[in-house]
Image (tube, rainbow, N blue to C red):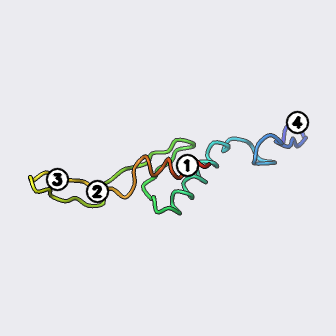
Amino acid sequence: MWKGLIYVNHCTMEGLTTSGNIQGLPADALIAILSSKSIWTVMKWVNDLILFHKPTHLTQGLSGDTKYHYAHDITTIKDITDPL
Protein backbone atom coordinates (compact mmCIF):
# COMPACT_ATOMS: atom_id res chain seq x y z
CA MET A 1 0.00 0.00 0.00
CA TRP A 2 1.30 3.44 -0.91
CA LYS A 3 -0.44 6.81 -0.55
CA GLY A 4 -3.64 5.06 0.46
CA LEU A 5 -3.76 2.85 -2.62
CA ILE A 6 -2.91 -0.80 -3.17
CA TYR A 7 -0.71 -1.61 -6.15
CA VAL A 8 -0.72 -5.18 -7.43
CA ASN A 9 2.77 -6.45 -8.16
CA HIS A 10 1.66 -8.19 -11.36
CA CYS A 11 5.18 -8.85 -12.73
CA THR A 12 6.31 -11.20 -9.98
CA MET A 13 5.01 -14.41 -8.48
CA GLU A 14 4.16 -12.89 -5.08
CA GLY A 15 1.01 -11.02 -6.16
CA LEU A 16 0.08 -8.47 -3.47
CA THR A 17 3.37 -8.77 -1.58
CA THR A 18 6.71 -7.19 -2.33
CA SER A 19 9.17 -8.83 -4.67
CA GLY A 20 11.90 -9.03 -2.03
CA ASN A 21 11.85 -12.82 -1.99
CA ILE A 22 11.77 -13.32 -5.76
CA GLN A 23 15.29 -14.84 -5.73
CA GLY A 24 14.70 -16.98 -2.65
CA LEU A 25 11.61 -18.82 -3.87
CA PRO A 26 13.25 -20.58 -6.84
CA ALA A 27 16.20 -21.47 -4.60
CA ASP A 28 13.79 -22.95 -2.03
CA ALA A 29 12.19 -24.99 -4.80
CA LEU A 30 15.60 -26.27 -5.92
CA ILE A 31 16.44 -27.30 -2.36
CA ALA A 32 13.16 -29.24 -2.21
CA ILE A 33 13.99 -30.94 -5.52
CA LEU A 34 17.52 -31.84 -4.36
CA SER A 35 16.14 -33.11 -1.04
CA SER A 36 13.75 -35.39 -2.94
CA LYS A 37 16.87 -36.88 -4.57
CA SER A 38 18.47 -37.43 -1.10
CA ILE A 39 20.89 -34.52 -1.40
CA TRP A 40 20.71 -32.94 2.05
CA THR A 41 24.04 -31.08 2.21
CA VAL A 42 22.72 -27.78 0.84
CA MET A 43 22.85 -24.37 2.48
CA LYS A 44 21.13 -21.28 1.09
CA TRP A 45 21.26 -17.53 1.52
CA VAL A 46 18.66 -15.76 -0.67
CA ASN A 47 19.59 -17.20 -4.10
CA ASP A 48 23.11 -18.42 -3.30
CA LEU A 49 23.45 -22.16 -2.77
CA ILE A 50 26.33 -24.01 -1.19
CA LEU A 51 26.38 -27.70 -2.06
CA PHE A 52 28.71 -29.62 0.21
CA HIS A 53 30.49 -32.66 -1.19
CA LYS A 54 31.50 -34.95 1.63
CA PRO A 55 32.73 -38.54 1.53
CA THR A 56 30.26 -41.24 2.50
CA HIS A 57 33.03 -43.72 3.17
CA LEU A 58 36.63 -44.47 2.29
CA THR A 59 38.59 -47.55 1.35
CA GLN A 60 42.25 -48.48 1.35
CA GLY A 61 43.79 -49.48 -1.96
CA LEU A 62 46.33 -52.29 -2.26
CA SER A 63 49.16 -49.76 -2.34
CA GLY A 64 47.90 -48.14 0.88
CA ASP A 65 46.33 -45.14 -0.77
CA THR A 66 43.00 -43.88 0.54
CA LYS A 67 40.07 -43.69 -1.85
CA TYR A 68 37.11 -41.49 -0.99
CA HIS A 69 33.59 -42.37 -2.15
CA TYR A 70 30.82 -39.81 -2.51
CA ALA A 71 27.03 -40.06 -2.74
CA HIS A 72 26.88 -37.24 -5.31
CA ASP A 73 29.08 -34.82 -7.23
CA ILE A 74 28.64 -31.87 -9.59
CA THR A 75 27.58 -34.23 -12.39
CA THR A 76 24.73 -35.51 -10.20
CA ILE A 77 23.60 -31.95 -9.49
CA LYS A 78 23.74 -31.02 -13.19
CA ASP A 79 21.78 -34.16 -14.14
CA ILE A 80 19.02 -32.97 -11.78
CA THR A 81 19.06 -29.27 -12.73
CA ASP A 82 19.71 -29.38 -16.49
CA PRO A 83 16.09 -30.32 -17.38
CA LEU A 84 14.88 -27.33 -15.33
Residue 22 location, quadrant: top right
Kind of element beneath mark 1: helix
Residue 11 location, quadrant: top right
How many badges with numbers are in the image?
4
CA distance separating discs 2 and 4: 60 Å
Kind of element beneath mark 3: strand
Pick the quarter of the image with the N terminus: top right
Going by the numbered disc 2, the residue's amino acid type is His
x and y percent of residue 6 in the render?
88, 43
- From the viewer's perspective, tell me whether residue 1 is left or right of residue 30: right
- Judging by the rendered image, the residue that carries numbered circle 3 is 66
Kind of element beneath mark 4: loop
CA distance separating discs 2 and 3: 10 Å
Q: Are marks 3 and 4 in contact (CB under 8 Å)?
A: no
Residue visible at 61% across and 46% down? Answer: 24
- Judging by the rendered image, the residue that carries numbered circle 2 is 69
- From the viewer's perspective, tell me whether residue 13 is left or right of residue 44: right
